[in-house]
Every structure is written in C-alpha cells, then in structure tokens.
Image (cartoon, grey):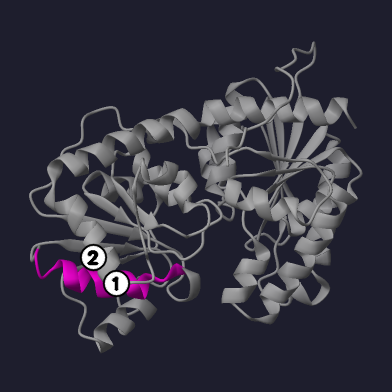
Amino acid sequence: MSYKSNNVSPIITHDCPLHVGIAAPIYLPLLSDYLDNTDAIEVEGMGGFSVTYLVRALLSLGVKVSIYTLDPRQTKPLLFEGSQLKVYCGHFRKHGRMKDLMRLERKQLEDFMAVDDPDLIHAHWTYEYAWAAIASGKPNLITVRDWSPAILSYHRDLYRVGRFLMDRVVMRKGGGFSVNSPYLYDKVRRVTKQKVLLTPNAIPAEWFLEYDKKRSSSFEIVSINNGFRGRKNVARLIEAFALVRKEFSDARLSLIGDAYQPGGEAYLWAQERDLLQNISFKGLLSNSEIMDILDVSDLLAHPALEESFGMTLVEAMARKVPVLGGQSSGAVPWVLDGGQAGKLVDVTDPSAIAAGILEVGRNEAVWAKYSSSGYQHAKNVFHASTVAKQVIQLYHHIIQNR
C-alpha cells in the first residue's frame, strides 16, 4: 500500500507570520541559539529530539514558535524568550503523576497555552501534551509517535494502563491527527473518525555525512536502545553476536542507551551466559557522542520487535551506516524502504540476525549498497526542511478548515 504524506493545499503566504504552539518534551540546548540570555538557562528538558529537530526547521522557515513543555527538575513555571521563539516550562512530577492521569501537568500546559494564544497547537504523543492541547480549545494537530496498546502488551503495569487511558481520550477528542509511519496510520485510522495524515520524523541537515564513508578493517556493530527486555529484544542480538564472532573474531558490538551501562541489566544478563566477549556497554550518551560512534561503526543492528518509527535507524542512515532491522517490526520495514535502504531479517531468531549481519559484513558491495541507498532514502524522505514544509501545509489547512 502506498501512502501520501499529505493532500493539502500549497503553503500560503500571510502578512503576519504563523504562530504555532508546540506541546511536547523538548531538548532545550539545541534551541539555545534562538533564545536570549542562554547563560542563565539551566533547563535541559526531557529529550524529544525528533520534535526539537522539527522546531528548528520551522524556525528556519520563518514560523513563530512557542513551546509548552515540562521538566522534573523545575518546581515553578519558567519562560525563556527570543525574537522568534518562546519556551514555557512547567513541573513534571517524578512520582504519583498517573494517579490523576497527570491532571497537574495538563493544567500547567493549559495555562501556558491560554496565556500564549497561538494560531494552532501541534501536540506530540497522545498523552498529557495532546490532552492539554484539546482542552485549550485552540485548533490542534496531534502527532501520534507510538502505539499505546502495543506498549501496554509488552509492559503490563499501572503506569502504562494510565497512558493507555489517556491515549483513548485523545483519540476520541482530538481535532486532527498525523502519524510518522504507515504502521501507525493503519492503527490510528481504526480508532478515530478524524482525518489522519502522514508526516515522518525529521532529521536535521547537520546529521547528514558530507564525505565518503569506508568500512573499517574490523567489523564494528552498534545498537542504540532505551530498555533491554520486552519489545527491545536486545538479548537476541547479543546471542546473534556470539554466532557472528565464530566467523569474525575481531568484530565488536557497542550497546548504547538506558540499561546498557557497565554492570547494568544487559551487562549482567550477558555475564550470566558468558556472552561479554567483544561487547562494549556504553550506557546513555549525548547526541554528539552517538554521532561519533556511528561514524566509526560499520552496521547499526536494531533488533526491536515493534517500532512506531525508529529514529536511530534514520540517524544511522544519515551517517552512511548500513542498518539491519526486523522484517515485521512495526514501522521498521517502511523506514528501510521495504529492504531497499537496509537489511530486513527475522529478529526473533538469533541465527537469522547473525546471517544478516554476516551478509553485510562479508561482502563489501552489499555493505556499500546499503550505505548509499540508506543515505539517499533518509535525505529524500526524512530531511528536516522537507518534513517542515509538509507540516506547515497541514497547519494552514487545519486553521482554514476549522
């Protein structure tokens, strides 16, 4: 099935710049050049790199942006300002927030929106940010970035139950939806009567490698995940890597993310099974550190059983690193262009993962094909400027048809 990114009118020029509110987690350091008095800013935010990349692209196209976000380190509301950007930051409770379905967090966000009064609010994820955008009464666009029922099926706890309930409220009341993959498109269409459009995650220009990449003499594999068990499925990758080393004894695997620090959950699991050989447990790293590791890596192996998008796949593709992912892992086959921009395998089977890694590792022509095709696909589909122009069209369409 083919999916169009949107079918709305061309971008409309207005005398006054469009003022858009973005309700989402954000990574504030990447926006500091748009804000005054950045030396006084101690807030980092809660991630949301894909949203932050989109905000930077919108700003570069002349859109006036206000951000409504939350941070657990802040106990009182904060406002940061620049000529084109405002950031409102409230408090995010570390504990107990799901007992009232994040009512206090939602109230702070609603207050920010009422004071700021944007033309439209673009909320990301289908939880507290989206619910607040709906309650504001402003025209809203909600971008669905994960699938709550799938997450609940892998993590059966009260917190995910609360997230699922919030998701259902948002799906019922939201004014308009976009999704970042056809995988989510099919699912969202089943639970809402509203129009659903496709706008993929954006990756900024600076991520795209501008020089030729060469494969290393050893074979350096990297995997980037937050979480070890459940749908992340990294245990199968560790088992597969032991099979790979039977042919490539010098191969190395770097594991990055939450649960992958030395002595962490993944380390202890591998240690118990005598599978630590040639594996580096890196833990959480900054974006710049991840980019540096990708630049010396020969393959990104992504064993996740389900992804609503898979930002790390596109980041690797932009650095000309071949990617291996799951053939039935949600949005992964779409991100990898049906296997044209990356190697697809059965990630439930360690031997299949190992065979895919070895196919890319043995043959330099295969490696070069995936390096080149992945890079071009990322540049054509996921470049931030391309995505931002599509999103601006949606904003005008929603405002005009309210």
**In the image shown, does 342 or 48 lie closer to the viewer?**
342
Residue 362 falls left or right of residue 53: left
Farthest residue, direction bottom: 272
Q: Separation of disc 2 and disc 1 at Cα?
A: 6 Å
**Which region shows up in magenta?**
232-247
| Residue 333: percent from left, percent from top | 45, 50
Q: Are marks 2 and 1 in contact (CB under 8 Å)?
A: yes
Residue at image coords 75%, 55%: 190
Q: Secondary structure at mark 2?
A: helix
Residue at label 2?
Answer: 354
Horizontally, is 238 left or right of 318 in the view?
Answer: left
Tag of residue 350:
1
Instruction: List x then y, in percent, for residue 352.
Output: 28, 66
**Which quadrant of the figure contains the C terminus?**
top right
Q: Is residue 64 above or below residue 357?
A: above
Q: Is residue 108 above or below residue 194?
A: below
Which corner quadrant of the image does residue 391 belong to? top right
**Predominant secondary structure, magenta span:** helix
Residue at x 28% of width, y 34% of height: 372
Q: Is residue 24 visible?
A: no
Quadrant in which residue 122 is drawn: top right
Relative placement, left or right, of 302 versus 52 is: left
Residue at 22%, 69% in the rendered image: 241
